[in-house]
Structure formats: structure tokens, C-alpha cells
Amino acid sequence: MTPLRFNEKKFERQTVVVSGRRVTYRAFLDLDYLMMPVAEEQRLNVFVPEPYFNQGRVNGYSRVTAPIFMPNTVGGYLPGPRDFPGNSAPFSRGATILQALARGYVVVSAGVRGRTTQNGGEFVGKAPAFIVDLKAAIRYVKFNAGWIPGDTEKIITNGTSAGGAASALAGASGNADFFATPLAELGAVPATDDVFAVSTYCPISDLEHADAAYEWQFNGLNTWHSQQLTRVGDRMQVTPVAGKLTAKEQALSDQVKATFPAYVNSLHLQNDQKAPLTLDEQGQGPFQQAIINELKWSAQQALDAGDDVTTQRGLTIQAGYVTQLDWRQYLRGLTRQKSVPAFDALDLSSPETSLFGSRLFAAGHFTSFAQKHSTVAARQADPDLVAAVNPVSYLQTNQSQVAQHWRIRHGASDRETSFAIPFILATLLKNQGRDVDLAFPWGRPHDGDYDLPGLFDWIDHICQ
Ligand code: DHB
């Protein structure tokens, strides 16, 4: 048998009740997707609706036409273990997998390395490991076209937060040269790794510009309100923490913020009427107004659905219409979550600095600004590497095969990265003729998969 060939004879049959309906599927567990893996995470699970093995159909799909849904469990750029239906562990997407099977999708859950993964005392999961593994898993699926059930030309990646960033990066960087060597070193199968569509919730991406975007949004708000997560058995316990920006941090905020307009303007973004979405030196202009309009639209949708939108600050409502959203008031109501810089922490304490460590170093900076102002002895990651794990890079120069369909969600109450981050991604994609469904669901904090019926309707729409 060819190595890494999918074997449909080795499975467990499982049945669960989903929303009152019995769903039977075959589980193919713990499959290698690399010839030379270096970490336990590098395996995947495949789940297939049982009817596909008996000439049956589910939701109009057959064994050969079913979309292949690939949710990842990456959170905080930590290792994202392979997942299974009903898994209730933190960061698991067990409920999503069950709902996807009920809709007739083939589900492939690949485990991927993360920033804390070690082998023999060395870190082996720093960037770009998470995306190398996700690509290797996608290649495994495409290499097995005709063996693995489902349509390998209809792969949809899905993830939330750092996992949303991984999903978006997979969609933007299809077949990019940068990954050829690391994929070959691990013994990835010969196949392409471009995908059909991307579902991403609150992607923590464009990391080298995320600090500037954050200060563009929150500069002037000098108290941060965050939460400490501690694992208690199977659950995460949440404790609120708060702090004030020092005078030095406030000065850094001004400096970082000042770099954002030039970045936005360099992207040459346009709205649907082809008008430029720019910012002036103060950080105001049509780019900001376009984001405000997205938030107003979101509030209007919630208002129309009968929600009380006045629990958020800054809205003016007249005769059933959201007529204004006062940006400053709205953000004051949300509050700042992170300190300065929000991502490239000067003491190397953030998840993102940990992502940009190396085999021997736990963490590194990824912007020259933080490197220059670092409060600890630190190295700066290679800018080519930083760019290679940023989906936006692939939309600026033509170096990859970009997914055609994108569904991007970022809660209107999410403070973990600036609204500008998903907005820039969506706008670049739209400007390049991709099919983009962007929304900022009203009142939603940092979260994902909260609207699965909507997500799956979208998948059916693009696949059927
Ligand atoms: C995640 C959240 C963050 O605020 C961050 O900086 C990185 C990752 C996450 O939930 O995955």
C-alpha cells in the first residue's frame, strides 16, 4: 500500500443524537499525515457520515460530492490537537464537528503543532509550524482524492482566533513556495494545498501591524480590562484583571498609532463603489468611516431582530434606525483589553512573541519597534518568516493560490484585536474579486462557531 494512503477499511462506527436526530458516522482515528512527524500532534481524524458508504445521500450530498470541512482547534497559538465529535475540552470544536456531520459534510480534524510543542528539549512548534502542519494535512486530503470520501476540491477550513488566523492563512497562501522546504523535511505527500473556501472567526492575524491597529483604535483609553484564564480540570476559570497604562506606555501608544495610517494607505483599499479607503495623519478618514458603517449595520440588524442595542454606548437611534455610532463612546463602552504594545510585548510575555521564538529561544520580537524598545534581552524573528505567516502578505504580491470564498466574522464587542484587522483582510480579498461575506455580529465578544446554521447555509450555497 502506498504510504499515507487513506484506508477506508479501518474505522469505528459511532452514533450520536444531534438535535433529536440520530447521526451515524465512521471515525478514522489517529492517522499519520506525514512520513517523518516530529510531534505527537501531527496526526488527524476523519469523520464520514455513514450513508456515504451505502450509496446514500445527506443534505443532497453523496460520497463524491460532500464538502470536506476542516475545523482546527488552535487557540492562543498553542498546539491544536486533533478533535472528535462531542469533545468538550477547552478549544475543542466537538459540537461543531457533530453539527457538520449532521449536515452531510466529511470532517477532517488535523492536529497541528503550537508555540509550546517540544521534542528532545527543543521547541519544534514555533512559527511557521502551525501552518506547515495544516498545509501537510490539506495535502494529505488532496493526495487521497478518490480514496477519502468527499470532494477534495471543496475543502473549507475553519477556526477561531489564532485558529481563525491559521484558517485564513491556509486560504491565502495556497501552494506558496515558502513552505516547500519545511513540508519536504517532514515528508508531506506530493499534492497541492490550496483550498476552496475559508471560514474564520476573529482571526488574530497581520501580527506585524496588529499593534499599530490596536493603538489606532484604543489610543487615549488608558485603563485595560482583561481576564486571566486558569485551567481547572476540564474547564477554564475566568478572573477579571485590570491595570493602567504608565506614562511611558501612553507615549508608546502615540508612537505606534502614528504608524497605522501609512500602512493602511499603502494597501490602496477601495470600497464597493471604488472610492479609496484611506486615513489622514490623525487616523481619521474613509477607512475609519467604513468600519463605523459596518458596526452601525450590525447594530441595525440586531435592532431589527428585536434586541436591545442600547446596552452598548455610543449609538443614536431615531425612528427605528441606527443613525450614528460615536466611535470614541462606543470604544469607551467596550474598554481596552490589552496593554502597549498589544501583541509584540516588550517583555516577551505575549502569546505572539512566544510564537516567534525558535528551536532554542522561548520567544522573540516580530516588529523592529518592539525590538528597539525591548525591556529584556531579545532577538527579532526574520521579517520574511513573519510575513510568510501573515495572510495579508499573499494579497499584496501574487505568490499563491488564494481561496475563492471567504466568510469572516468578528464580534462587534471583541477587543482582542482591532476591527481593522478583519476589515483589511476582507477588503483586500473583495478588491481582488474574491467572494467575501464579512460581518461584525452585534454584542459578540471574542468567540467562534456561534452561528453554525448560518455558516453551514453559506457552505451549502457555495457548494451546491
Ligand atoms: C488568541 C487570543 C488573543 O488575544 C491573542 O493575542 C492570540 C490568540 C486566541 O484566543 O487564540
Image (spheres, rainbow, N blue to C red):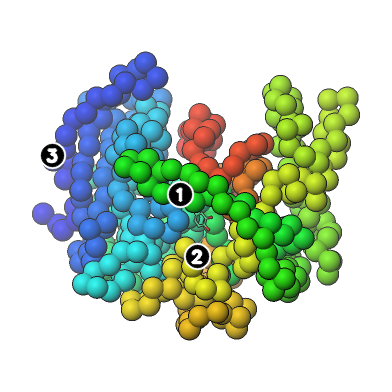
Q: Residue at x 49, y 59 (%)?
A: 169
Location of residue 9 by image quarter: top left
Is 11 in front, or is 174? 11
What x and y, as percent, mark residue 298?
71, 37
Find out if the beta carbon at label 2 lies less than 8 Å from the nearest ligand 1 atom.
yes
Q: Considering only vertical position in the picture, is 318 above or below 341?
A: above
Image depth: mark 1 or mark 3 in front: 1
Residue 462 marker: none
Mark 1 or mark 2, which is nearer the start of the sequence?
1
Task: Identify the residue position indicated by label 2 in the image.
Answer: 350
Find out if the beta carbon at label 1 lies less than 8 Å from the nearest ligand 1 atom.
no
Mark 3 or mark 2, which is nearer the start of the sequence?
3
In this rendering, the count of numbered labels is 3
Cα separation between marks 2 and 3: 45 Å
**Residue type at numbered disc 3:** Lys
Task: Identify the residue position indicated by label 1 in the image.
Answer: 229
Q: Residue at x 88, y 29 (%)?
A: 318
**Residue type at numbered disc 2:** Ser
- Mark 2 neighbour class, 10 Å CA radius: few under 14, some 14 to 19, many 20 or more: some
- Mark 1 neighbour class, 10 Å CA radius: few under 14, some 14 to 19, many 20 or more: few
What x and y, as percent, mark residue 258?
76, 71
Cα separation between marks 2 and 1: 14 Å
What x and y, as percent, mark residue 30?
20, 48
Give yes or no for contact between labels 2 and 3 (Cβ–Cβ under 8 Å).
Answer: no
**Left/right of residue 115 with respect to residue 24 in the rendered view:** right
Task: Identify the residue position indicated by label 3 in the image.
Answer: 9
Q: Quick one: SS at disc 2?
A: loop
Q: Considering only vertical position in the picture, is 113 above or below 105?
A: below
Is 8 in front, or is 444? 444
**Residue type at numbered disc 1:** Leu
